[in-house]
Amino acid sequence: MTFEASEPSKRQRNRATYAAFTAHIEHLCRTDPGARAALRAGLRRDLDHPRTRPMHRLLTPRLPEGCDDKTAQAHYTVASLIAAQPRHAFSPDQGDDEDTADEHGAKKQAPREEGEPDERQAPPGPTPYGSSFGATLGQAVTAKGTSMRMSAAESRINLLTRQSLRGIHLHLPAAVNQVRTTDASIDWEQLLADLVDWQYQSGRISRRWLQDFYRITAGADQD
């Protein structure tokens, strides 16, 4: 009973840690162009690549204590993907939510109306999932005025879900670039969680990405 009760709590703590990390990276990219350039240079590169060296100073203090190389690589990849967004993605009038993320493990949200559910609370069930990258691709297909075709998104999601750990890190940047042509948003902390777990649970994560994608695109035109 104790073990079963502790698992959701552990996942929630991990999710809070990932949220704090991604909020910090977004803040860094918004306020420090040099740091943003250094992080962007790490796209598709492993931890020992010469272009990755400037990232160590920026990211090492934010890595989970005692994490292995695969977990570190997940954090480096997501940091690079965030940094590679267009400049306008880091709105200059966006409030600094880094302190809130560090304290609460989630980004600052607008005040709720009375009686409105708090979205920061974990949903019922054993695992507090966020929005998967499969869901993001699905939303990119179905968004109003989207430029992404169903066939292109389907090819992309099938390619991603067949990848090894190394392969998913190499292929994600192109997929993220496709999503950026639409209004679909990426849940960075969930993507980070999935990359951290890919080495152990790629089958389960791939299934969820595919199911989310096809659930959302069920009514989309097939081209």
Image (spheres, grey):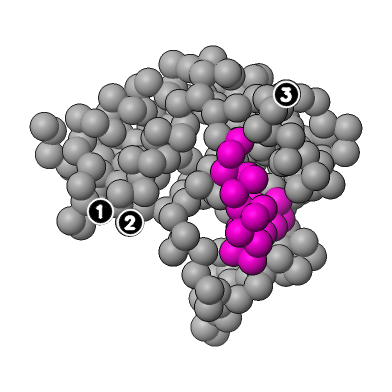
Q: Can residue 169 be seen in this view?
A: yes
Q: Distance between the residues labelled 3 and 2?
A: 34 Å
Question: Label 3: how many residues lie within 10 Å, few (<14), some (14-19) or many (20+)?
Answer: few
Q: How many marks?
A: 3
Closer to the chain start, of discs 1 and 3, is 3
Q: Is mark 1 on a helix, strand or loop?
A: loop
* Image x and y of residue 171, in percent: 45, 26
Question: Label 1: how many residues lie within 10 Å, few (<14), some (14-19) or many (20+)?
Answer: some
Tell me the tag on residue 48. Answer: 3
Q: Distance between the residues labelled 1 and 2?
A: 7 Å
Per the image, the residue denoted by label 1 is 143
- The quarter of the picture where residue 148 lies is top left
Q: In this view, does 70 lie to the left or right of 171?
A: right
What span is in magenta? 20-42
Q: Is residue 37 magenta?
A: yes
Quarter of the figure that contains the N terminus = top right
Residue type for callout 2: Asp
Q: Do callouts 1 and 2 mark residues in contact (Cβ within 8 Å)?
A: yes
Q: Residue at x 60, y 31 (%)?
A: 195
Q: Which residue is drawn at 48% across and 41% down?
A: 132
Residue type for callout 3: Asp
Closer mark to the observer between disc 1 and disc 2: 2
Q: Distance between the residues labelled 1 and 3?
A: 39 Å
